[in-house]
Structure formats: structure tokens, C-alpha cells
Image (cartoon, helix red, strand yellow):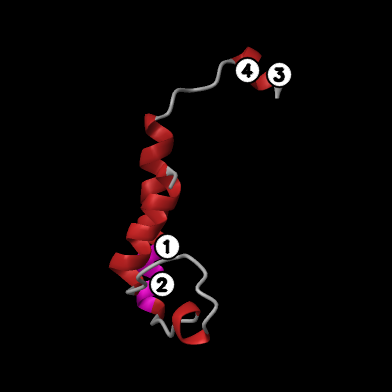
């Protein structure tokens, strides 16, 4: 599991009460009734995690950007 997948799974568990983000091919396991304030909390946590992850990554040089 990648770092991003791990972070998303932890956010889903903590804020949404979702055990796993894996598809289990069962409506009762794959669809969830979630309060909007829980979704808002999860989105805020994901945004903050992205900011922290982005801040910790090395910045691209001008030549690296030009090669993309």
C-alpha cells in the first residue's frame, strides 16, 4: 500500500467509520450513509495531509520541470 493509500485509509477509518477502502462487491459493505460534518472533517484531514506531504517533498528544479 502506498503512503497516500495508507493516509486515505486512516482518514476513512477515523472520520467516516469506514473499515477499508477496498471494493468488497457488497452494497452493505461498499456504500455508507455518512453525515456531512464527517465528510467535511475527512476532506479537511486529507487537505492537511496533502499540504504536509507536499511540504516535505523536494522541490523540482527548473530543468526537471522543463523535461516534463
The residue carrying mark 3 is: 67
Mark 1–mark 4 contact, CB under 8 Å?
A: no
Q: Which of the labelled discs sits on residue 63, or is there none?
A: none
Is residue 24 or residue 47 the one in the foreground?
24
Measured in 3D between alpha carbons, the distance from the residue under mark 2 to the one under mark 3, in whole angstroms, is: 38 Å
Is residue 5 or residue 55 the one in the foreground?
5
- Kind of element beneath mark 3: helix
Q: Which of the labelled discs sits on residue 43, or is there none?
A: 1
- Kind of element beneath mark 1: helix
Measured in 3D between alpha carbons, the distance from the residue under mark 1 to the one under mark 3, in whole angstroms, is: 33 Å
Label 2 CA crowd tier, 10 Å (few <14, some 14–19, many 20+): some
Mark 2–mark 1 contact, CB under 8 Å?
A: yes
Position of residue 31 measured from the top left corner of the image (x, y, whole percent): 49, 81
Residue stretch rendered in magenta on the structure: 37-42
Is residue 27 or residue 15 the one in the foreground?
27
> From the viewer's perspective, is the residue at label 1 or at label 3 nearer?
3
The tag earlier along the polypeptide, 4 or 2, is 2
Position of residue 30 measured from the top left corner of the image (x, y, whole percent): 49, 78
Position of residue 32 measured from the top left corner of the image (x, y, whole percent): 44, 82
Amino acid at each position: 500500500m502506498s503512503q497516500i493509500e495508507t493516509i486515505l485509509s486512516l482518514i476513512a477509518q477515523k472520520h467516516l467509520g469506514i473499515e477499508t477502502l477496498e471494493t468488497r462487491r457488497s452494497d452493505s459493505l461498499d456504500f455508507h450513509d455518512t453525515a456531512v460534518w464527517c465528510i467535511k472533517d475527512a476532506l479537511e484531514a486529507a487537505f492537511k495531509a496533502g499540504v504536509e506531504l507536499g511540504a516535505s517533498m523536494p522541490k523540482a528544479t527548473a530543468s526537471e520541470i522543463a523535461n516534463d
